[in-house]
Image (cartoon, rainbow, N blue to C red):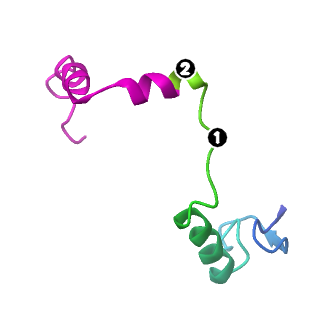
Amino acid sequence: MKVQCPTCQTQVVWDTTSEYRPFCSKRCQLIDLGGWANEENSIAAGSDKENEMASSLDIEDIEALLSQQEPDFFKAN
């Protein structure tokens, strides 16, 4: 199967031999990473209601929510 490199649109074979898939090269991979680092790329947020709730929580609310978790919640698997 072939896909287009998200950076330069070159055709890339999509299989385990493609080291940088979905990118065609390390260069294109780093260009994309730079876009994320410079906040040029983003993932769309959920509804405004979810964002409002997240921004309205203060440290006490967060601590209260964490205290309600099971005792082994923070243990690594």
Residue 70 vs 43, above or below: the answer is above
Q: What residue type is labelled 2?
A: Lys
- Please check the rendered image and state whether residue 62 is part of the magenta-colored stretch, yes or no: yes
Quick check: can you spot residue 19? Answer: no
Residue situated furthest left in the rendering = 71
Residue 57 vs 37, above or below: the answer is above
Looking at the rendered structure, the secondary structure element under dot 1 is loop
Q: Where is residue 73 in the image (x, y as percent from the top left)?
A: 22, 29
Looking at the rendered structure, the secondary structure element under dot 2 is helix
- Foreground tag (1 vs 2): 2
Q: Which amino acid does label 1 sit on?
A: Ala
Q: Residue at x 55, y 20 (%)?
A: 49
Q: Mark 2 points at which residue?
A: 49
Q: Position of residue 11 (x, y in %)?
A: 86, 72
Q: Residue at x 60, y 30 (%)?
A: 46
| Label at residue 24 | none
Q: Where is residue 57 in the image (x, y as percent from the top left)?
A: 33, 25
- Please check the rendered image and state whether residue 27 is part of the magenta-colored stretch, yes or no: no
Q: Is residue 54 left or right of residue 70?
A: right
The crowding category of the residue bearing disc 1, from other C-alpha atoms within 10 Å (few below 14, some 14 to 19, many at least 20), is few
Residue 49 vs 74, above or below: the answer is above
Which image quadrant is residue 76 in? top left
Viewer-closest of 70 and 16: 70
Q: Earlier in the sequence, mark 1 or mark 2?
A: 1
Q: Name the residue under label 1.
A: 44
Q: Give the range drawn in magenta.
A: 51-77
Alpha-carbon span between mark 1 and mark 2 = 14 Å
Quick check: can you spot residue 11? Answer: yes
Q: Residue at x 76, y 65 (%)?
A: 6
Q: In this view, does 51 lie to the left or right of 11?
A: left
Q: Which residue is drawn at 17% across and 28% down?
A: 72
